[in-house]
Amino acid sequence: MGGFRQSMTWLHTWTGLLLGWVLYFMFVTGTIGYLDTEVDRWMQPEAPPAATSVDTSTALHLALAHLGTEAMDANRWFIAFATDRNNPYLRAFWRDAEGNGGNDLLDPVSGRPFKPRETGGGQTLYRMHWLLHYLPDDFTEWLISVVTMVLFVAMVTGVIAHKRIFRDFFTFRPGKRQRSWLDAHNALAVLSLPFQLMIAYSGLIFMMFTCMPLIVVAIYGAGDAARDRFFDEAFPGFPGVEAAGRSAPLVDLHGLLATVDARWNGESVRYLDIYHPGDANARVTIAGPIGRGPLRGSPRIIFDGVSGEVLEDVPARGSVARATYDVFLGLHEGLFAGPVLRMLYVLSGLMGTAMIATGLVLWTVKRRQRLEKSRSVSVQGLQLVERLNVGTIVGLPVAIAAYFWANRLLPVEMAGRADWEVHAMFLTWAALLVHAGLRPLRHAWLEQLWMAGAAYALLPVVNALTTDRNLWHSLVTGDRVFAGFDLSVLGVGLACAVLAWRLRGRVPGAAASGGTQANPSATRS
Amino acid sequence: MRAGFVTVRSRRSEAAAGTTGRRATAVVARCVAAVLGGYGCTQVASIVVAHLVPGSRADGVLVATMTSFLVYTGAITWSFAAASTRRAWIGLLVPTVLLALPAWWIASGGGGP
């Protein structure tokens, strides 16, 4: 019994440490991902306020006019309507056979494309959540799968380990430093456990065809053709037809919109996806609303793009198995969430982030304590982990602030601007990891916390100096996205500063003894 | 007195200080059992699940692939929880071998179209 829990504790400790930093990165970027389009909009201050209630038929007219002049040779047109926060602008996207194309946001009244500054936006941060950066996708998909599996195992074993810790809690009086960290780690994990388990498990489901591919192979056979057959059966409703090479006029799309309006009782259409416009084999897919629940699917109708005949009518909800799959992915992405639920998502994400961070610190505090009682612990390993902790737990948020600063400070016309925003982020992170390695540990914590405080609290100032949409203006005009962003970063900055202020004198003797004691806020819980 | 699990683990590490090498080998053996043995066991079990789930073939694959992570988690937990490395491996290999036969039969088309 004790042996079982003990080995679970061991497994939890080491799997947690091994991939804790990657998990921390995933939690931070994933949490920001719940506000991806809001960040997008803040990073493109030239874009007009979103107008999500424009008449669909007018919008279609404007988008078609734009595609008709810009993208005559394209073999795919995609028109996304401005429906809600997930897609705040009318968007026309196209691709030709060589993979070239464009993606323009259109003014809802004039239909003219507005060309905001080039930026990675919230989407680049969000994509880092599972693709990381600078690494090939194939590699990161596997890495992320392994990391997510480890997270899931660490959670399950953490629950098992916790039971014993919980009992010990009342039986003994453990050392205060460690108990405080353990306390925080446990409280965060337990409070948000349903969310964290859901996120880890649904994260695995996102990756499941990458890391568990053999089940498809066993049932459908090996090879791409067999795999495609499975995907066609499990995920119907994606036209895979080639162009005929004969031209034929595209069906009247307004007529198709009227058809779907009748079928879906006038519920908002999300997008039109047109393959081979102007070809005899044209296909038009029209997708309906995403729904108010976590069921991720939306109804789709596929039309013959010449005759307008309905070829396939895919309901939002498939078989029980498929609906289960969709619900897990829908819960993970939270696209259905309104403002209140979205805030809960962000809060749960922050708790997950803090759970990872306190777990990482707990690992070092425990070993530092043991070291002081001169038990055999590797000092070099412990120091390395302590330094990586500072440079990641505080360094990464500072790096993300640098990403936002770069968005405002890099010249608007600069070539490769979006790339350099990301470079600024990773260069900052690298600099802070070096800083954490060079400074005495207590100083590293405090200095980086002050840096984080300044980097975030000053963002509204930078915004006010570089755009005409300052915080006051946003508040007066009721610009929720800009006001929300400015106030949030201000809050994060002040929180970091308060933390740094309260920690300044808390660690006894660290500076005198060469400052290798990492223990900010140890006596607080 | 200190928190129970810390005390137990510390004493254990002191006692094992002379046999660090053997302990490391045991850890590696369990990791291999968990990661590779557990994965193999998960695959064969999930292939059988995919075949047994009612509904279409695609539904079977979806359900089995989704639940495969639960099987894998169970297998990993078992690998580290078993009293000895030997028992960990036996606990993984026995179901793997037993399920490999039907899995092989399903994969070679015995389960229908």
Image (cartoon, rainbow, N blue to C red):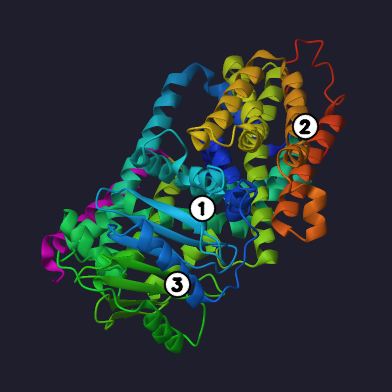
Asked if residue A496 is positioned above or below residue A441 in the image, the reply reads below
- Magenta stretch: residue A347 in it? no
Relative horizontal placement of residue B90, taking residue A65 as reference (left or right): left
Q: Is residue A326 visible?
A: yes
**x and y, in percent, of residue A79 in the image:** 42, 65
Task: Give the residue at mark 1.
Answer: A200
**Residue at 57% across / 19% down in the picture?**
A381
Cα distance between the residues tagged 2 and 1: 33 Å
Give the image quarter of residue A95: bottom left
Same chain, labels 2 and 1: yes
Task: Give the residue at mark 3.
Answer: A61
Dot 1 amino acid type = Ala
Relative horizontal placement of residue A319, taking residue A159 as reference (left or right): left
> From which residue to which does the magenta span run?
B84-113
CB within 8 Å, label 1 to label 3: no
Disc 2 or 1, which lies upstream in sequence?
1
Q: Chain of mark 1?
A: A
Disc 1 or 3, which lies upstream in sequence?
3
Question: Which mark, by number, is residue A454?
Answer: 2
**x and y, in percent, of residue A33 in the image:** 57, 51
Q: Chain of mark 2?
A: A
CB within 8 Å, label 2 to label 1: no
